[in-house]
Image (spheres, rainbow, N blue to C red):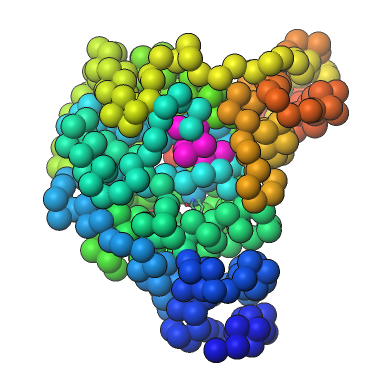
Amino acid sequence: MNFVEVIAKKRDGSELSEAEVQAFVHGASTGQVPDEQLAAMLMAICIRGASRSETQRLVEAMRDSGVLWRTGESFPEAVDKHSTGGVGDTVSLVFAPLVAACGVPVAMMAGAGLGHTQGTLDKLAAIPGFRTAANRGEAFDRLGRCGAFFAAQSQEIAPADRKLYLLRDTTGTVPSLPLIVASIMSKKLAVGARRLVLDVKCGSGAFCKTLAEARDLAGALVAVGEGAGVEVAAAITDMSQPLGDRLGCANEVRAAVEVLGGAGDERLRRLTVELAVDALAMAGRPRPDALAEIERRLADGSALARWGEIVRAHGGDPDAARLPRPRRTVTVPAPADGFVTGVDAEALGWVAVSLGAGRLRQGDQVDLAAGLQVHTRVGDRVEAGRPIATLEIGERPVDAEATAARVAAAIRIGETRPAPVPLVLARVGGKA
Ligand code: URA
C-alpha cells in the first residue's frame, strides 16, 4: 500500500478503509511507517475528523497492536480510571489508593503528559525507585498484593498508542476527538478491566473547551466502552481553572499525599471523592454508603497507608520528603486589587511545561522538580502586590521575569466576583 496516497485520502476528507487504518496503526507500532508520515496522518485526522466506524477501527487496531491482559477475567471487580487531560489534575494518584482501601481493586493504565497537561506517569516518575508494572504478571501480582497497579503503554500493551501519543504531544495533534477516543479506549480495552471511571475535562485547561465538545467526547468514549462490554461512568468536570493548586510532577505527588492524609486541596479532594463514589457504586455499593466509607478512609489514615503499600509494591519510596525539590522559587504578585474572574488553565499548563514539567519535543527529559503553585481561585479576592502564584524552577534555564508575566496574564482580575462554576458539570453513563 502506498501510504502517501492514504494520507492524501484523509487529507481530502475521505473515510479510510479497515485495511488503511490497520496499515497506519501497524506502521506506527512496528516503525514501518516513518514519523513524518505518521505525523501527517495525525494532522489530517485532527483537521478532517473521523467517522464513528473509522474511530472504532482505530480503537480496535490500536488495542490489538499489543497483547491483551484481560484483567477482568481474573479480577472481575477491578476498575480503571482515566482523565481526558487537565491541569493540576492529580486525581489518579489519590483515586487508586483510596478506592483500593475501600476494597475495590484498581487496574490503572496511566499516560505521560500530553500537550500542556501533566500525565500520571511523569508524576509517578518523581517518586524515587517507582517502576510501573511492565507486564501482566507484575501487574496482577501488585493487584493481588496491594489492590492496585499502575501500568504504562509499552511495547507489550497498546504499543501503537505509545508511539502515536508521543508524536501527538509534539505535533499539535492532541485535541482531536477520534484520536483521544482511540488513545484512551485502546489501552483501556487492552488492559481489560470491566469497569471504567472517566473524567472528561471541559474548559480552558482541557482539550474540550465547550460543554458541547465534552458531551460529544464523553458520549463517544462511553459508546466505545459499552460496545466492548465495559461498564463506563463518565463525569464531565470543570477545567476552567487548574483543578488542584499545584502543577508539576513532584509537586502533584505532594498534593496527592496531603489529600490522602485527610487534608490538602479542597477541589482536588472533592472531585476525587466524586469519582471514587462512582467506582464503588459500580461495585454495587449504595452511593451514601460509598461516600461514608471514602470519607472514613481519608480520615482514619487507611487511604494514606494504602498509598505507601502501593508505592512500595512498585519499588518506590513513599516518603514525601524524598521527592525532588526545586532549585529556586519566584513569587508572582497580583498586578491589581480585585476578584479573580478567570484563569487560563492552558496557559498555566504551558508555563509548567516551559519550566520543564512536560515535553516540547519528543525525547525531552521532564524536570521532576519543576512546577507552579497557584494561590488563588476564581472568585477569590486579591490585593495588588500579594502573591498569586509561585514558580518552582528546577534545572532548566528560565527567564523568571518573563515567565512570571505569563502567569500574571493568565490570572484575570476584575471588579466583580464571578458566579461559581460546579465541579461536576454533567454525567454520562454510570449508576445513579
Ligand atoms: N489521555 C490519553 O490517554 N490520551 C489522550 O489522547 C488524551 C488523554
- The foreground one among 316 and 351 is 316
Secondary structure predominantly adopted by residues drawn in magenta: helix
Q: Position of residue 264 (x, y in %)?
A: 45, 16
**Splitting the image into 4 quarters, where does residue 47 fall?**
bottom right
Q: Which residue corresponds to the image point at 26% horizontal and 43% vertical from the top-left?
A: 139
Magenta span contains residue 363: no
- The foreground one among 61 and 136 is 136
- The foreground one among 299 and 305 is 305
Magenta span contains residue 119: yes
- Residue 336 appears left or right of 172: right
**Splitting the image into 4 quarters, where does residue 338 fall?**
top right
Residue 92 in sight from this viewpoint: yes
Q: Position of residue 71 (x, y in %)?
A: 22, 52
Q: Position of residue 186 (x, y in %)?
A: 39, 62
Q: Position of residue 187 (x, y in %)?
A: 38, 57
Q: Look at the image and tell me in which quarter the N terminus lies.
A: bottom right
Residue 86 in sight from this viewpoint: no
**Splitting the image into 4 quarters, where does residue 411 fall?**
top right
Q: Which residue corresponds to the image point at 38% horizontal and 19% vertical from the top-left?
A: 318
Q: Look at the image and tell me in which quarter the C terminus lies.
A: top left
- Residue 328 appears left or right of 289: right
Q: Which residue corresponds to the image point at 28% horizontal and 61% vertical from the top-left?
A: 68
Residue 376, compared with residue 279, is above or below; it is: above
- Residue 10 appears left or right of 83: right
Q: How many numbered discs?
A: 0
Q: Which residue corresponds to the image point at 69% horizontal and 49% vertical from the top-left?
A: 361
- The foreground one among 172 and 126 is 126
Q: Which residues are magenta?
A: 118-124
